[in-house]
Image (tube, rainbow, N blue to C red):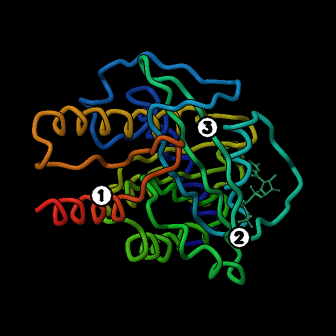
Amino acid sequence: MSEEKEHNDSKTNDNTKEEIQKNDDINYDNENESEQSLRYSIIKDEITSYDMSFKIIIIGDSFVGKSCLTTRATKNIFDNYYTATVGFEFFTFACRMNDQNVRLQIWDTCGQEEYRSLIQNFYRNASIAILVYAIDKRESFENLEMWLNEIKSKGHPDVKIFLVGNKNDLEDKRVVSIKEGNKFYKDNKLNLFMETSAKSGENVQELFKSAAEILYKEHSAYKNLANKNENMIRLPESIDENNNIIDKDDDEAAKRKKKCCLG
Ligand code: GTP
């Protein structure tokens, strides 16, 4: 499909855009849960004690804006100049959900092919993978399938996948319509779809708030169940007394070992 045709498509999708934004700014896989309101605020100052901590990995082609999304969310800055990420960079997004301090450990990864082998191990234990494409670059949308396979083959089986179409301030250069993004999200049964702009800041806080909310709710629900029946269920993610993320698999293995030794 030509860029011009795509652009026209995106224009005809303006209604869809309006509808999505009017009805629900974020396409969310569990609407009932999203309706329950939580007390939420961003923690600006460094704190040392968190009630829960989760790992989030950001993946996608080079130049789609992964680093910019991360720095916009964590430092509220936007850099027009491009510096390729080598391997990965690590950021903290901290917020308060009800009376709990929640930390998102954000791993911003490199999109450039020559560095990709460096990040293979970082998929492990991510609670959420944010899969980013740029709305002005069709190739980055076409490569989503490859990124999805990466996370499915190397990530945790329970990993949640958010789809993000970044650079939506570049409406006049749009070549991927909202309808196409929405279709990919639905066809692949992903957990959230939204368009963002790291440049204007549109939807960036909402993206990370949604991540914190979905993980907080899941963690709280599991914790309640786990309290009721310790053997029945395991927490989706947890931290140890030193605030380190406990490896789900290692934790399970340790529990099994403990039980085995006790037995
Ligand atoms: P790699 O590190 O190579 O994987 O790239 P990346 O995906 O981290 O891209 P990065 O955040 O470095 O951004 C690439 C370029 O796009 C930079 O020049 C940014 O200024 C620009 N950019 C990022 N986000 C946006 C956006 O939302 N809108 C616009 N207009 N430009 C953006």
The local crowd at label 1, few if under 14, some if 14 to 19, many if 20 or more residues have their Cα within 10 Å, is few
Is the residue marked by circle 3 packed among few (<14), some (14-19), or many (20+) residues within 10 Å?
A: many
Residue shown at 52% from the left, 52% from the top = 56
Q: Is residue 127 above or below residue 250?
A: above
Q: Which mark is residue 93?
A: 3
- Front residue of this view, candidates 95 and 235: 235
Q: Are marks 1 and 2 in contact (CB under 8 Å)?
A: no
- Mark whose residue sits in front, 1 or 2: 2
Q: Earlier in the sequence, mark 1 or mark 3?
A: 3
Q: Which residue ends up furthest to the right in the rendered image?
A: 81
Residue 87, which numbered label?
2
Amino acid type, callout 3: Phe
Residue at (46% x, 67% y) in the render: 124
Q: Amino acid at mark 2?
A: Gly
In the figure, is residue 87 to the left or right of 102?
A: right
Q: Is residue 78 above or below residue 122?
A: above
Question: Do the numbered discs 1 and 3 sit on residues whose CB atoms are within 8 Å?
Answer: no
Name the foreground residue: 163 vs 16.
Answer: 163
Task: Name the residue that disc number 1 marks.
Answer: 189
Q: Residue at x 18, y 39 (%)?
A: 226
Q: Report whether the residue tagged 1 is closer than 8 Å to ligand 1.
A: no
Q: Earlier in the sequence, mark 3 or mark 2?
A: 2
- For residue 100, what is the image quadrant? top left
Quarter-of-image position of residue 113: bottom right
Residue 178 spot, x, y in % from top left: 49, 50
The residue that appears at 70% across and 24% down in the rendered structure is 45
Q: Nearer the viewer, residue 92 or 11?
A: 92
Q: Where 112 sits versus 246, above or below?
A: below
Q: Is residue 107 left or right of residue 240?
A: right
